[in-house]
Amino acid sequence: MNLKQLGAVWAASLFLGGCMLGPNYKQPELDLPAGQSSDNFSVFTNAKWWEVFQDPVLDQLEAEALEYNKDLQAAVARVDQARAAVGIATADQLPSLSAAAESGRAGSQAGSGETQSTANVSVSYELDLWGKYRRLSEAARAQLLASEAARDTIRLTLTADVAKNYFSLRMLDAQLEIAQRTLKARQENVRIYTSRYQNGYCTEVDLKRVEANMASVQAQEQQLRLKIAQTETALSVLVGKSPREMVQNDTARGKSLSEITLIPDVPEGIPSDLLARRPDVRSAEGQLIAANANIGAARAAYFPSIPLTASAGYASGALNDLFTGSSGVWAVGGQLLAPIFEGGKIRAENEQAEAQYREMLASYEKTVQGAFKEALDAIAANRINREIFDSYKQQTEAM
């Protein structure tokens, strides 16, 4: 291939540079409710959503979890891996440049032979006529999007678990306090009945009954202590405490249950754009985009690839003369590589890519379904639990 032919190939590559095989990604159309404006849900779009409870201890636990939790650290590392993969895919679209130098002497029984020294720089580049590497780069960027969303999913789940365990701990503390007061009353009752029995004012059956009541409350108190210890260790793992800190078991307490600010009532109507921001939905869509891009990369295998190479350097029989003008050498070349018979491999790879897209599409649609189900369940639970709370409050006030 001479320089004129090489220039023609480069011109053709620029003309065909916009050609990419495979379908361009289009977000699937889903049957979603219209809902209302997401402005009414602004309190739930805050990244630090737990601040609504206005508990400094909870705020501190959440901050420690976001910094030290091991699952979240692993998710961040996976994002870094995906970001590096984008860099690798981008580099495949650029020319590669390498340098080499060699010097040696070879001979045989007939003589000592000759010294041969070389030094050259070479450039190689594959024309991306069919968009194979651009599709692979698109897939890598989509995988990065999915990894970032998966990290956000872990982050959201982590902060929810920290809050859940913290409130469970405060609830168990309150139950333990009630159990301790009840136990103290039962112990006093046993003391009174023991005195009455010793003085003949009650039967042994009456004494055994109040002793049994006291033992039952004692068992409940011990069970609560066990649950508190288990909840504290679970919370310690979530916030990333070391084994030494877990053994010390010095979990801080903040506001009591009666002092904690209740979350605001959730308005009716789910804005679809709000649920589309959920990290699990974004992760599923990232996987779908990557699968769509891989279809184009697989289809490009049907078409020829054109790698180009060029090199320039020096070659000399004497090392001292290596960089003289007469030692200069150069080479330019190109190849046309086209598949002829692959035993059905390329067709199977295309079918595999299309099947993976269908799988990711079903997974994306199911994730959206799950997002709406969980949101509807949460709204119903919020409304009904408020009604239950009001009923218990009315019962308590009436006693």
Image (spheres, grey):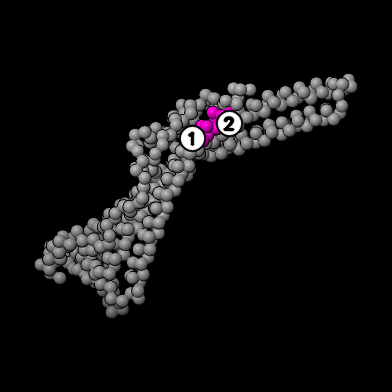
Name the quadrant containing residue 215: top right
Determine whether, in the image, residue 166 is placed left or right of residue 207: left
Question: In terms of depth relative to the viewer, which is nearer, 289 or 313?
Answer: 289
From the image, tell me which residue sits under label 1: 383
Q: Is residue 149 above or below residue 235?
A: below
Query: Does 235 appear in magenta?
Result: no
Number of numbered discs visible in the structure rendering: 2
Please identify the dominant SS of the magenta region.
Answer: helix
Q: Position of residue 311 (x, y in %)?
A: 19, 63
Name the quadrant containing residue 295: bottom left
Amino acid beneath label 2: Met
Tell me what residue is drawn at x 36 percent, y 50 percent.
31
Question: In terms of depth relative to the viewer, which is nearer, 376 or 232?
Answer: 376
Instruction: Say few, some or many: other residues with alpha carbon within 10 Å of mark 1 (under 14 / 14 to 19 / 20 or more).
Output: few
From the image, tell me which residue sits under label 2: 171
Name the quadrant containing residue 360: bottom left
Quadrant containing the C terminus is: top right
Query: How many angstroms separate mark 2 from mark 1 (CA)?
Result: 21 Å
Q: Is residue 2 above or below residue 186?
A: below
Q: Position of residue 315 (x, y in %)?
A: 19, 66
Amino acid beneath label 1: Arg
Indicate which disc, 2 or 1, sits on the residue closer to the N terminus: 2
Question: In terms of depth relative to the viewer, which is nearer, 337 or 102?
Answer: 337
- Extent of the magenta region: 382-392
Tell me what residue is drawn at x 23 percent, y 63 percent.
130
Question: In terms of depth relative to the viewer, which is nearer, 362 or 314?
Answer: 362
The residue sitting at the left extreme is 4
